[in-house]
Amino acid sequence: MGIRKFWWLKASPHTPGSGYVLLHHVMGETDGDRGVWSYVEGGMGAVSFAISNAATEAGAHIVTNVEVYMRTLLTVT
């Protein structure tokens, strides 16, 4: 909710006096503790690997390094 209050600000967290940086420090939450920041062990690439592993375990077949000729959007009802 706090970030929505700043949509009009046109200021970065580095802008002196904006208070925006304070929002960045207090909006984090980890395990219900507010103002706490967490980091992914292994970096953001570890998130991609975790998603890939979960998809593969669920039966997905992942193909890389191929040219895409056509995209099709499937609607599941």
Image: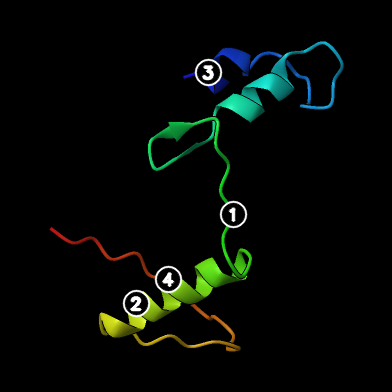
Q: Residue at x 56, y 13 (%)?
A: 5
Q: Amino acid at mark 1?
A: Tyr
Q: Earlier in the sequence, mark 1 or mark 4?
A: 1
| Local secondary structure at mark 2 | helix
Residue at 78% across / 26% down in the picture?
A: 12
Q: Earlier in the sequence, mark 4 or mark 3?
A: 3
The numbered mark at residue 39 is: 1
Q: Residues within 10 Å of mark 4 (few under 14, many from 20)?
A: few
Q: Determine which residue is flagged by label 4.
A: 51
Instruction: Give the residue type at disc 3.
Output: Gly
**Coordinates of residue 19 in the picture (x, y in percent):** 72, 14
* Placement of 55 over or under 65, stated as above or below: above
| Disc nearest the viewer among 3 and 2 | 3
Marks 4 & 2, CB-CB < 8 Å contact: yes
Q: Quadrant of residue 67?
A: bottom right
CA gap between label 3 and label 2 equals 34 Å
Reading the image, the residue beneath label 3 is 2
Q: Which residue is mark 2?
A: 55
Q: What separation in Å lies between label 4 and label 2 (alpha carbons)?
A: 6 Å
